[in-house]
Amino acid sequence: MKLNRLIQSIALAGLGSSVVMAQDTAVPDAEDAKVERIRVTGSSIKRTNIEGSLPLTVFSKAEIDAQGITSAEQLLMQLNIAGNSSDNLASNGGIVSEEQRGNNGVSGANLRGQGADATLVLLNGRRVATHGLKGRAVDLNSIPFAALERVEVLRDGASAMYGTDAIGGVINFITKKDYTGAEVSAFADTTEAGGGNIYRTNLLLGAGDINKDGWNVFGTLSYKKNETLEGTDRAFSNTFQPERGLSPDTRGTPFATVFNRPAAERNLIGTGLRDPRDGMNMIAINILDLPGGLGCENGGPNMGPYDERLWSSISSRYACAWDYPAAARIQQPMDSLDFISRASFKLSDEHMAYFEFVGSKVDVSKAFEPNQISPGAVFNRSTWYPVTGASYNLIYTALANYFGTSQLNYGEPIAYRWRCMACGPRQIDTETKSYRINAAFEGIISAFDWDYAVGLSRASSTSNSILASGYHYTDALQQVLGSGLINPFLFPGQRQSDAGMAALQAASADGVRLYDGESLMTQLDATFTGGLGFELPGGEIQAAIGTDLRREEFKFNGDQRAQMRPIFNAPFDNANVLDKVSRDIKAVFVEFYLPVLDSLDVSLAGRYDRYDGFGSTTNPKVSFNYRPIEEVMIRGAFSTGFKVPSFNQLFNGNTESQYTGLDLADPATCPGAVASETIPGCASIRPVEIFGGKPDLKPEESEQKSFGVVVAPFDNFNFSVDWWEIERTDTIRSAPRDVLINNYDVFQANWIRDSNGQIVAIDRRFINSGGTLTRGIEIDANLTGDFADGKWRLNLNGSYIDTFKTKGLETLPYSPNLVGEYVRYFNLPIKWKHTLNLSYTRGDWSHSLTQIYRDGYKDELPVSVRNGSYTPSGWNPNVSSYTTYNYSMTYSGFDNLNFTFGIKNLFDEDPPFTAHQNDFAAGAAWEPRIADPRGRAYTLLLEYKFM
């Protein structure tokens, strides 16, 4: 059939088409090759590569190399069906909450915007351990990327085959199965603007011919280095763009800002200074910004005026600000070393055994702005700047010249807010060591003519985060500041005293363990597949049956020094320390392939999982493909899925946080819970909010649907269109305050009251509540032809998101569609993404030109626009689309030597501007979930074979 021949030829080319089926063994020629039965991602039944129709995207090693992709993270950033979430090292480089703690050093896979913990990652068809800090998602940095043969991406739910986490889809990283000879490769990816360079080298050795000698052993060792890219290395990373709605919301500046404190605390200002122009009380004053002052820009690098209109804080009209988002690292430095070895033995013509070891060590270092010193409970009067001479007099004189002396208290200490540049940037170093040992047997049970595969594996991910620069013991830091040895009022070029720097160094907490954890998995799996001996009009019924037995273990350690001697602003997590917890999973699955007609195939699958602790779940799947005419194939699927609670969500300890706002009221007596002293029953309350795990959580559940068509009207043209829908229910999340308020009748028990009926606490621990609905369309089109004795190919691959809605309760309607709207923290659902690739091969030369497009979206509203007080003159509510071009050229005409040269971001396109609030997301004036900040870069790959 014409369609099958085209699908087969594209699969053999390995060019990443979504039409293809993957295969384990390459066939030299599509027309003359022996038809071999193979197993594909998403199915346990071995079939010929022209029988199946799974919506599978395949990336060959050659294609990955041609694009200059050096890591799984980079591949996911270019994959159109991947979500736009905080899953890369640029978007999780700042301070994170406990919920995102596991992002330290982690890159995750997130298909169809379902999250890294709802996308299953496999290595050679089997699970690997989740990251040690969180135990929820696999760290892609631990995947031995240089040893890959291909990557298969199943764009469909697969809980019926693989169990938990396969809601968004499955990514299967497939390494070499055997190798004979020796090969070395080196890769460099250097930016034109400097910073953020990437280097990789790889050594591959192998011996033994599996067919002649009956054995093969090979190993590959790879080293990769990502150099630092600082926020200040790129001009577009600039938060001082107030006319466009973006300005930093901080008054903690390198040249300190004087802050008003209550009269009872008695400081230089006292109860505040009133502006002579209009009598308004001033809260924050930087003498550089006073009328006639030197100007905020002269206070140090990245300083500028605080935009009081944008932040609706007129009492800070004389304050300065500092571009703290630009102080974070855009690309975290990373060093990784990974090793994979495999020994294969041919036991007989029908039986094989192999042993595989994969290990990696990844070191990542993230750094962000120095600590801010603010007057308050921690830095009280004893730490304010004392009367020490010139700097004190400088501040007093500047204030007196403008405000007069009547409200100033000469001789009293100065309460200030200061960015402690002398303390150094806050840095957290994370080391992750991972391994997987796997022993497996595969072959044929000749008596039944069935294939079998049995494997036993053990996998671990151990991660350790330690404090580096920028963190100090609180008591020692208080003492240093109160001594006057450290001066917060220094101009550029002035230095802190040697005594002050020595005191800071003595107070340093550099090297203190922040936390560490380990995720372990032991798995025994077996699969048997073959024909049942029953014929249908389309052929023999095929079946697969298997079992999956796993033990998952997790432990998390804090550092008791956080309680014995607190460290200022260190993000410890001792409340969630877990001794080793574990659960056993027992699963069986079955699959049937029914060739109902020559033109109609139906697949049925189902899996039963039983988990220690919260019971069992059964998930079916039915799929079909129908070929009404030779040029057309129609396919579709329906399945259910599930995601079990993580150990953190089940067993985290309780933490309490005081609600500090004055806008909350008792929802039982005040509908909407908005405080108002003039409305009876709406008095302001300030309860404690309780966060933590809940052992009675249920698994999240999902339904996946898809329907598509593959059309091949001509030998040189084919396309596919697939519609899909994912609906998730009982989603696990910390109880949102607005859900608890708006559905008070359902969540009365979460509002904890004392004996007098007064609310004293709100239980916001994890709950199963509400759900999400996501729909989209994926397209793929291929056109090929001949030109000037060469062959060209044009491929378009795109993803269109039509619907992304959420709801707080199952009984509630879904929210308005969020597609094209800014969403904080998690997935940013842009409407359209595509990759357009033109490749040309002639003789030993091949060329590739790729366009990568990311749609625009509605920006987050600045505070002043949201409350209607002020709209900046250059404010644009829309973030522009983002288009980049990559070019590569490969030459293979030298003996034993191949080289590939490439240019990334050919036209040096900057990321589009966005005014999102930097306190809640990474990126200063740009969005790391969408864009590549490195700019134009040049790549060179050299591969040399010794034998």
Image (tube, rainbow, N blue to C red):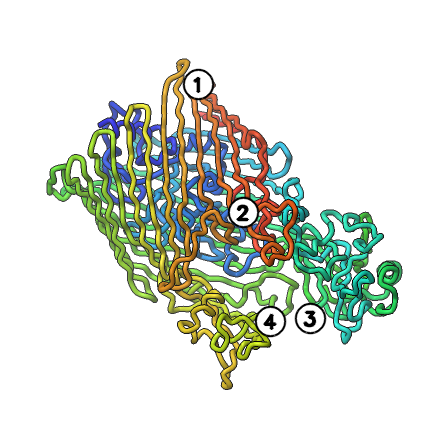
Tag on residue 844? 1
Residue extending farthest top? 788
Q: Nearer the viewer, mark 2 or mark 1?
A: 2
Q: Position of residue 779 (x, y in %)?
A: 36, 37
Type of the residue with mark 3: Ala
Q: Nearer the viewer, mark 2 or mark 4?
A: 4
Q: Quadrant of residue 284?
A: bottom right
In this figure, which residue is indicated by the disc labeled 4? 662
**Which comes before the other along the chain, label 3 or label 2?**
2
Left or right side of 827 for 47: left
In this figure, which residue is indicated by the disc labeled 2? 89
437 versus 372 height, above or below:
above
Q: CA distance from mark 1 to mark 3?
A: 71 Å
Residues 36 and 670: in front is 670
Q: CA distance from mark 2 to mark 1?
A: 37 Å
**Which comes before the other along the chain, label 1 or label 3?**
3
Q: Helix, strand or loop at disc 2?
A: loop
**Around disc 2, counting alpha carbons within 10 Å, would you say few (fewer than 14), some (14 to 19), or many (20 or more)?**
many
**Which comes before the other along the chain, label 2 or label 1?**
2
In this figure, which residue is indicated by the disc labeled 3? 377
Q: In which quadrant of the rendered image does the N terminus lie?
A: top left
**Around disc 1, counting alpha carbons within 10 Å, would you say few (fewer than 14), some (14 to 19), or many (20 or more)?**
few
Left or right side of 679 for 279: right
Residues 684 and 172: in front is 684
